[in-house]
Image (spheres, rainbow, N blue to C red):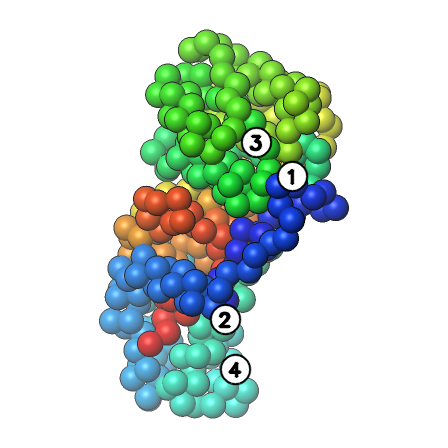
Amino acid sequence: MATSWQEIVDLGARQPGGVVAVEEEAPEQRRGVFRKLRESLSKSRQALTEEISASLFDKIDDETWELLEEALILADVGAPTTAAVVEKLEQEVESGAVPMDGVAVRDRLIEILAEVASTGRAPMDLSAEPAILMMVGVNGTGKTTTIGKIAWHLSKEMGLSVVMAAADTYRAAAAEQLETWAERAGAELVRGEEGSDPGAVAYDAINAARARGADVVIVDTAGRLHTQTNLMEELAKVRRVIQKQIPEAPHETLISIDATTGQNGLRQAKIFSEAVDVDGVVLTKLDGTARGGIALAIASDLNIPVKLIGVGETLEDLRPFDPGDYAKALLAE
């Protein structure tokens, strides 16, 4: 069933203020979440099911596996991941481990995709006091909006006190956008002058969090182009500034990837992970693309788990990623 915010966030032994007991999502609420995910993946599912229907496996031969490979690659699962998935399924069918039956083969394919999507899976580590979460990613991926929504969920659903650091000092609208979200989430915002040192803003935010006993600091960073080496170096510098105050921080580094960019998103994740240690991916705009397979490519090729997905504009549309639900939403009848 769909992963909840309480399941995706690791608070360690810490008990956030204002939370007496965690309420589990009701079964009907979880079913509603799955329906929303299925709807958001409709473009990807349509692209896949045109090729991967149960009838594809009615007659299993070399052409079957070639068609399956083509369909997965078109969905941006990526060539290496596709080859591994198809090889595994083919071997299991030929060995008799999976019955040579269309429905059984399709069901096993869904299971294998869920296994791939689970690669490297781990909760968001917010167990430190304060916990430092750094967000990175290029312009236009929905990074700043994602930060605001994360802050809202942590504050309103989990009772955590949040400080937001507007360390994207090169885009004036970024700080203003965060200010709106800070008010909405009941979070504190620390910002600097336009063009000021991003590291200094992060430094001040951590100091403010310590002084006020805040639970989490979320550090926004400039939506720098991954092809610009000097800006990537500056991102690494922000990380070093954070570590001067808290050596083991950032405790969680997330990269925002626009699902509609497909394999280009995979390249972004790879290059960012070389500049800073990326712990997880927030895959945004999943509702607007036929390239939903990119979640599999990121998890398998880079061993970076997808932790959150954006499937719409509302607060509830930023959801923890559930590999099983994702695979079923892509392929299940």
Q: Which of marks 3 and 2 is nearer the N terminus?
A: 2
Q: What residue type is labelled 2?
A: Ile
Along the polypeptide, which appears first: circle 2 or circle 4?
Answer: 4
Mark 2 vs 4: CB contact within 8 A: no
| Element on which disc 3 rests | strand
**Residue type (three-letter) at the residue carrying disc 3:** Val
Badge 4 amino acid: Glu
Q: Identify residue for label 1.
A: 17
Q: How crowded is mark 3: few (under 14 residues within 10 Å), some or many (20 or more)?
A: many
Q: Earlier in the sequence, mark 1 or mark 2?
A: 1
Nearer to us of marks 4 and 3 is: 3
Residue underneath mark 3: 162
Question: How many numbered marks, from 0 up?
Answer: 4
Residue 194, image quadrant: top left
Gap in Å between the C-alphas at discs 1 and 2? 40 Å
Q: Which mark is residue 314?
A: none
Sequence-first disc among 4 and 3: 4
Residue under numbered circle 4: 92
Dot in front, 2 or 4? 2
Q: Toward the viewer: 35 or 331?
A: 35
- The foreground one among 2 and 154 is 154
> In the rendered image of this protein, does residue 97 appear above or below residue 295?
below
Mark 1 nearby-residue class (10 Å; few <14, some 14–19, many ≥20): few
Q: Neighbour class for label 4 at 10 Å: few (<14), some, many (≥20)? A: some
Q: Residue at x 45, y 16 (%)?
A: 169
Give the residue at x 46% y 58%.
Answer: 296
Type of amino acid under label 1: Gly
Disc 3 + disc 2, Cβ < 8 Å: no
Q: Which of marks 4 and 1 is in front?
A: 1
- Residue 66 seen in the figure: no
Choose mark 1 or mark 2, whichever is in front. Answer: 1
Query: Of helix, strand and loop, which one carries label 2?
Result: helix
